[in-house]
Amino acid sequence: MVVIHASPYKVLTQRTCSCLGKTASFNNLFYLRGSSSLKDFSLLGRIRFCSFSIADVPSSKRRSRGPVMAAKKVAEGGKQDEGKYKHTVALPKTSFGMRANSSVREPEIQKLWDENQVFERIVSRNSGESFVLHDGPPYANGDLHIGHALNKILKDIINRYKLLQNYKVHYIPGWDCHGLPIELKVLQSLDKDARKDLTPIKLREKAAKFAKSTVKTQMASFKRYGVWAAWNKPYLTLDPEYEASQIEVFGQMALQGYIYRGRKPVHWSPSSRTALAEAELSLSLSLSLSLSEHMRYPEGHVSRSIYAIFKLVNASPSSSNVIGEFLPDLGLAIWTTTPWTIPANAAVAVNGKLQYAIVEVHSPLGETTVPKEDKRRRLGQVLQGEKRPFLVVASDLVPALELKWGVKLSVKKILLGSDLENCRECPVVIGGDYITTESGTGLVHTAPGHGQEDYVTGLKYGLPILSPVGDDGKFTEEAGQFSGLDVLGDGNTAVVNHLDGQSSILMEESYQHKYPYDWRTKKPTIFRATEQWFASVEGFRQAAMDAIGQVKWIPPQAENRISAMTSSRSDWCISRQRTWGVPIPVFYHKQTKEPLMNEETINHIKSIIAQRGSDAWWYMKVEDLLPERYRDKASDYEKGTDTMDVWFDSGSSWAAVLGKRAGLNFPADLYLEGTDQHRGWFQSSLLTSIATKGRAPYNSVLTHGFVLDERGLKMSKSLGNVVDPYTVIEGGKNQKEAPGYGADVLRLWVSSVDYTGDVMIGPQILRQMSDIYRKLRGTLRYLLGNLHDWKAEDAVSYHELPMIDQHALYQLENVVKNIKESYENYQFFKIFQIIQRFVIVDLSNFYFDVAKDRLYVGGTESFTRRSCQTVLAEHLLSLVRVIAPILPHLAEDAWQNLPFPYTNEDGSVAKFVFDSRWPAVNERWLALSTEEVNFWAEILELRTEVNKVLEVARGGKLIGSSLEAKVLLHTSDVNLASLLCKMSAAMNDVDNLHCVFITSQAEVIPSLEDELTADVPYSGECEINGKKVWIGVSKADGSKCERCWNYSPKVGSFSEHPTLCSRCYPVVAIQSPQAVAAVS
């Protein structure tokens, strides 16, 4: 409780400490006490004293506008009388504008960097270790989105910080230029006639042209973000040298036995007519998933599921005693969400360890549980007829199935799944643990040609691998009456109707669930057995798992994600039935279809592609593509037409870039991409590297989340919530609704978010970022303006600095130290918080506030002004450099406006901000004693409480400006009282209490006796770190100085300048020795 009195006897107002014990919010910043650790600057610390929010605490403008405003008024055309001494006030001067004018100034700065080759020159000059952040290649198939901006800016922040730390930074930007996305773009641009005449070579030419054009466009956008990279020598996956390196990786894996050809079920996209890897799938998710997942994939897939019967024709000798009595009316009940796979059925699988029941189906339980109007569910004919078969189902599921089907199931017999093995002409087989009682019937329809688990079970029992489905997703002639029907459309319906006509359908219902979609066409895929090329992950899975444990994952939970994906993944299907890609370098014998691929043929193809590019595979003849010793048999062979999975393309970048480019090292220091790349680039790079090099291609991996709108929703054009990075920077058509903020505001946003999860952006967030950017820019402008006449030789030595200046340097050094720690840990949001708190609270609301008096009116050559300028110079040089990785344009703009040259330790002048180094550690500044640190924390707490009493006095019309006030203090704590007395009597006119409070006088009184407090109209009491302090406010003694606006009894003592105080008089009369002598 803070009690404020209108007099020593009457309580005027009471205010409860609303902040006490509460966690500070983002908008309620306050001064934190304690040591130099990061917690000093955490926004989540706890306050230990009563304080209003910053909006409640009067600013310097409300408390003391001072002579600066008068001088400015005259300068702007006011009356001369109002600014009689304006020429004696040292106003700030700088060409550094308050407005960023980003659309003009940022491109100018980027041009300045380019013309002076700043990035290249600094990399060449730096003498530290090499740092390689290997760029994951974006697809060259369209404009950039906000996720690209997040990714590239994060990388640039890291690289720029490493430059300041004297690292030789190598950053080669890359682009993924092959694959279906680009091929589709080309095809969509052509009419039907043009497509008919499109040969593979023509298609590849158009695809390459499109990719290169897109690379150029995307590169320009990345540059506009302020990203530094080796733009003149990027890596493109279509470059011949890159393709040759990829062939080399493929060859090494093939020679070690990790590449094989087989007929296996793979994810097949009928819409793209090609096989897909797991990384090329997205899932249409059910509504039960978490919000973030649902936002990414909002539409749930609905399948037409059925409960069907496979009738047992006869029993094997071993099972006849178990089920013989129920034949021929016994059926196996299965449940499937893919009825179209039934024509490829080869068996029914059970779990050998589960108990199964033979049940008799009775009439429906009263009213049917399936209303006629419920179109999602339909009973089959077998449940509507009079004769019903006995069924085999998992015994644990009997109650659930009764409820589902609306019938009574009476258990006739219990048996183990193992008792059913081979009891049917189309055999009953024992499956794996994938058969459970969580859903369905506990029996699984098995089609080895249409499912991975079915395939494994089929290999065990030698079942046929049937897949009567063509590339277009339609049944082939093998499917008989269903030939030509779309398996995901009318073919599915036809199978269901046929089964129902055979009295084999128990129930049909709609089922919403996870289902794989082709991430490019956004259409559902199928599992289909085809002849494909695979990488045998099983051959090096354990090595990959071991390598994962040796990598530093940021955030740490990312290790669990990629470990789970790697441990459970099946063999990698690396072949694609497309034209635009790197060919799988294999030849097939025309008669036997046996593949020809060995070290000699692979190396020969690699050398050809290195010289001519992968187009050579399409335009060269077989005899020219084969090595010399095979050419006499060239007529017996034909070229393969499959291309490699684009994830194999990008997954080989470590070999094509890190292993080939000068100055780079393998493994890379860091990979940085979105969290979806655990399934994609991180994993494909890991697998190819482990298979050929035996180790991961990266030492550390950093992942970031997806970008959502400011409501947490996925961005989509239909919702109108897409945030375009170009519009953020340059502005939209309506500049009022969509102003251009510039690249640095976008970069500031990137630094503000905790990228380890999904992040949000939108108009309101961008406005907040813009406001914070302006405050940062205003801080730099204040520093630059007040150093316009300062030179390095004007610096005051540390031991001569006033206490307040030494404390300011202590705070600065802690800020730099904690920011460095956050850069090292890639925790940029903490840097954002530290800088924002430091600039707004510690500098603007305190140090800058109290410094204005001595800067503007203390005399241009005065010790107090030079000591303050010494501190401001250190702040300017440090702040500009620590924000430079995040806000390079702002930092460079400030650096180009430095009023003095900055010289590096080697004697060279830093013409650009990145020519300098990271601020050197100054242990002397950090050596401020604990007692001094704690004392200043108490002083700042006290200042906050004094301001409250001043505000009440202002409300009572006692004072207007805080300079009209005199502050009286009393405490019974001896130590605190002694320190306050020392400050009150400070001789340097800087550490004095009245300067800290921005009042004309401040006095520490020995007691609260009436003779000392009777005439004090406003007072209050507070507790500072457990020590009670009484605060009194009365009118200041003396008259108002016309120049500095302080009140002093000395005003009127100087005949030449009767309106000046004893401090201002010698400043004004400095050129008059007689006047100076009179003062002394």
Image (cartoon, rainbow, N blue to C red):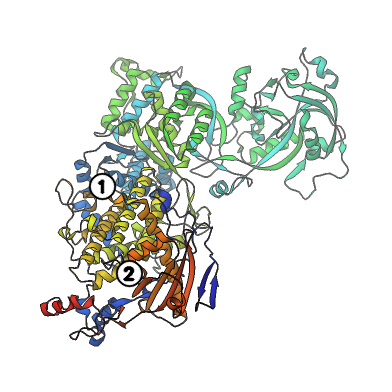
Q: Are marks 1 and 2 in contact (CB under 8 Å)?
A: no
Position of 749 with respect to 310 (left or right) is: left
Residue of label 1: 920
Instruction: For marks 1 and 2, give the CA distance.
Output: 31 Å
Q: Position of residue 610 (x, y in %)?
A: 28, 30
Which amino acid type corresponds to the residue marked 2 in the rendered image? Cys
Evaluate whether residue 403 shows in this view: yes
Q: Quadrant of the C terminus?
A: bottom left
Q: Is residue 735 above or below residue 663?
A: below
Say what secondary structure mark 1 lies in. Answer: loop
- For the residue carrying disc 1, how many other residues have a C-alpha within 10 Å: few (<14), some (14-19), or many (20+)? few
The tag earlier along the polypeptide, 1 or 2, is 1
Q: Is residue 460 above or below residue 48?
A: above
Describe the element under mark 2 as helix, strand or loop: helix
Residue at 22 percent across and 69 percent down: it is 93
Image location of residue 895, percent across then percent down: 23, 57
Measured as percent of width and height from the top left, residue 76 is found at 26, 81
Circle 2 packing at 10 Å, graded few (<14), some (14-19), many (20+), is: many
Q: Residue 839's quadrant in the figure?
A: bottom left
Instruction: Give the camera-side residue of 867 and 147.
Output: 867
For residue 995, the mark is 2
Q: Quadrant of residue 498?
A: top right
Of marks 1 and 2, the one in the foreground:
2
Q: Please state which of residues 983 and 934 is positioned toward the viewer in this rendering.
A: 983
Q: Is residue 98 visible?
A: no
Which mark, residue 245?
none
Q: Quadrant of the N terminus?
A: bottom right
Q: Amino acid at mark 1?
A: Ala
Residue at 50 percent across and 31 percent down: it is 563
